[in-house]
Amino acid sequence: MPRLTSVQELSSIREGGKILAEVLEKAQELVVPGMETAYIDRVIEETIRAKGGTPAFKGYRGYPASSCISINEQVVHGLPGERVIQKGDLVSIDVGLEWQGLFTDAAFSLVVGRMDDKAERLLNACREALSAGIREARPGNRVGNISQAVQQTIEEAGYSVVRDFVGHGLGHSLHEEPQIPNFGRRGDGMLLKSGMVVAIEPMANEKGFQVKVLDDGWTVVTADGGLSAHFEHTVLIGPDSPEILTRSPRRDSLHQ
């Protein structure tokens, strides 16, 4: 069973979420043509450590970097390295943070430079799916309510939902129960309770939902080469309504 968050822990996890939002704001500024992804990852790690936090991804199950930077057909877990960002790339950045022993996790996608209609519609569908899922993160609902809302939003827009990777509970560790699939049926799954913290993270593919892992053992790509988008927030299930712990007013106004 997921562990509920105490009042004292909630204060810390709110602080951690605020720091992570600031880190992602900084990362967003670096997503420009000519920027090497390894440099972005280095700045992300330096920013987290300068604020007193710990990059939660680094070393987790052997992952070698502080962030996942996925480009175009890459869905999640893109390894930062020598790849240079180009104008027109669809870039997704996913970062986890540990602060005072508690964990938050968030991601955003954007297109570098002017978006074409195809990429803009995909990003909009994925953003709207995240919002739809968050609206269902209320006590008394079930995980399937979130999953159904995400799936319906993405599929009604004409895109597909990644099945192989899902959202999750978090807080006391980076990944906890319950899993939060981006597909499912309303009324199915674990009952949601006030005090639970979950990461809701729709991944929307331009074409089919099938994915595969590259030979580096980490990078997940669409099987058909289509584009993919990824948005994520850490959300507290409050007594009356969901609270987005990793919200950045500036970033959300631009890309969420």
Image (spheres, rainbow, N blue to C red):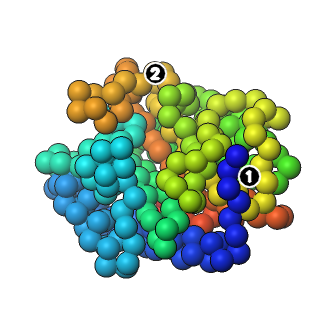
Residue shown at the point (37%, 67%) measured from the top left: 54
**x and y percent of residue 127 in the render?**
56, 49
As displayed, is residue 77 above or below residue 235? Answer: above
Q: Secondary structure at mark 2?
A: loop
One can see residue 39 in this view? yes
Q: Is 38 displayed left or right of 175 in the figure?
A: left
How packed mark 2 is, by other alpha carbons closer than 10 Å (few <14, some 14-19, many 20 or more), is some
1 vs 2, front mark: 1
Residue shown at the point (64%, 31%) measured from the top left: 183
In-front residue for pair 237/73: 237
The CA span between labels 1 and 2 is: 27 Å
One can see residue 87 in this view? no
Residue 158: quadrant of the picture? top right
Q: Is 43 displayed left or right of 21 in the figure?
A: left
Residue shown at the point (82%, 35%) measured from the top left: 187
As displayed, is residue 69 above or below residue 185? Answer: below
Q: Which residue is mark 2?
A: 210
Q: Amino acid at mark 2?
A: Gln
Q: Is 138 displayed left or right of 21 in the figure?
A: right
How packed mark 1 is, by other alpha carbons closer than 10 Å (few <14, some 14-19, many 20 or more), is many
In-front residue for pair 37/50: 50
Residue shown at the point (31%, 52%) measured from the top left: 59
Q: Which residue is mark 1?
A: 137
**x and y percent of residue 105 in the render?**
49, 57
Q: Amino acid at mark 1?
A: Ala
